[in-house]
Amino acid sequence: MANTDLIGNAGVYWVAMELSLRGLVALPTVRNCPGADVLVLDPNTGALATLQVKTSGKRPKFWPATAPPDAWRKTSHAYVFVRRTAGGEGFEGFLVGSVEVAADVAANFEDLASRDRKPFAEFRLPKDPDAVARLREAWDRWRPPVV
């Protein structure tokens, strides 16, 4: 199994590839760019967006994820949570807006603290399979929002 840095890079480049196949300009950032792993431009609308990519080489139901700073909580910034497909032959993505990620991370902190467990910044997939499917569909059709 590849180390976590390589898995993370694979996820970023998978996201960039998928977006490029949709006719979008997708530019992975350098590793020291805080908050954004991919810059995205829709050449048809001029819309710009940033994506934070969190990748696992397994099939988790949660990913380590810090809440975005207030300045990044807007419709033009989202997270793509990437994991291996069930057969392990590829990746699948789940798109979640930055405001939703911030709320989910805060709720998970509170949940863990209420159970006397060590707080851990994470994003959890919903337990409802239909809600999970909606996040997958959101990724499958995502384009930078025109604001």
Image (tube, rainbow, N blue to C red):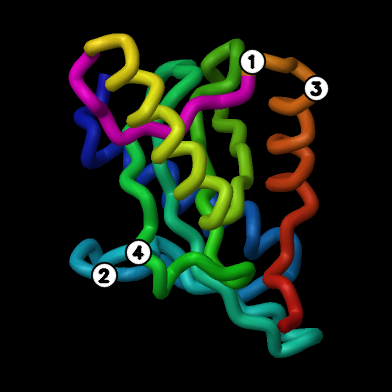
- Residue nearest the observer in this picture, 43 or 54: 54
Residue 130 percent location from the top left of the image: 80, 22
**Circle 1 residues within 10 Å: few <14, some 14–19, many ≥20:** few
Distance (Cα) linking label 2 and label 3: 34 Å
Disc 2 or 4, which lies upstream in sequence? 2
Distance (Cα) linking label 2 and label 4: 14 Å
Per the image, the residue denoted by label 1 is: 127
Per the image, the residue denoted by label 3 is: 130
Q: Tell me the mark number nearer the camera, choosing from 3 and 4.
A: 4
Q: What's the residue type where badge 3 is placed?
A: Asp
Q: Is mark 4 on a helix, strand or loop?
A: loop
Q: How many labels does the image show?
A: 4
Q: Is mark 3 on a helix, strand or loop?
A: helix
Per the image, the residue denoted by label 2 is: 33
Which quarter of the rendering shows the C terminus?
bottom right
Specify whether residue 128 is in view.
yes
